[in-house]
Image: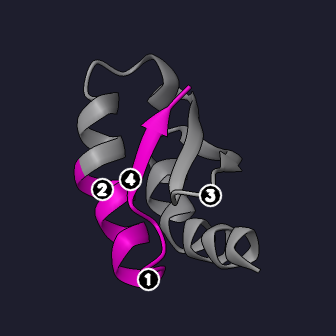
């Protein structure tokens, strides 16, 4: 159930990333609410990818899925 909520929230973020030639791939979520994601395409090699993960993706996921405690890139 938690994984599905996260994937739905990511679908809302995805168009913004795709507009810049990138995307996000869900890897896993652990029992502490830590979500592992992989930025792909242009986002995967962007020097601002940590900022995108923390300020963009993590803040959006936390707002939409309260069980999420943090987001890490893999």
Select label 3 or label 2 by which is in front. 3
Residue 60, compared with residue 1, is above or below; it is above
Closer mark to the observer between disc 1 and disc 2: 1
Q: Secondary structure at mark 1?
A: helix
* Quarter containing the C terminus: top right
Residue to which mark 1 is pinned: 64
Residue at x 68% of width, y 75% of height: 2
How far apart are the alpha carbons under marks 2 and 4? 12 Å
Q: CA distance from mark 1 to mark 4?
A: 13 Å
Mark toward the viewer: 3 or 1:
3
Question: Which of pointers 3 and 1 lies earlier in the amino acid sequence?
Answer: 3
Say how many tags the image has: 4
User: Which numbered disc covers residue 31?
Assistant: 3
Residues rendered magenta in the picture = 55-74
Comes first in the chain, label 1 or label 2: 2
Q: What residue sits right under mark 4 in the picture?
A: 70
Check if residue 63 falls in the magenta segment: yes
Residue 40 located within the stretch drawn in magenta? no
Q: Which label lies toward us, 2 or 4?
A: 4
């Amino acid at each position: 159930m938690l994984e599905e909520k996260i994937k739905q929230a990511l679908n809302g973020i995805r168009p913004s990333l795709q507009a810049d030639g990138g995307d996000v791939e869900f890897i896993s979520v652990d029992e502490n609410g830590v979500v592992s994601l992989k930025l792909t395409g242009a986002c995967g090699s962007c020097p601002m990818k940590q900022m995108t993960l923390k300020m963009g993706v993590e803040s959006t996921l936390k707002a939409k899925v309260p069980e999420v405690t943090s987001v890490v890139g893999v």
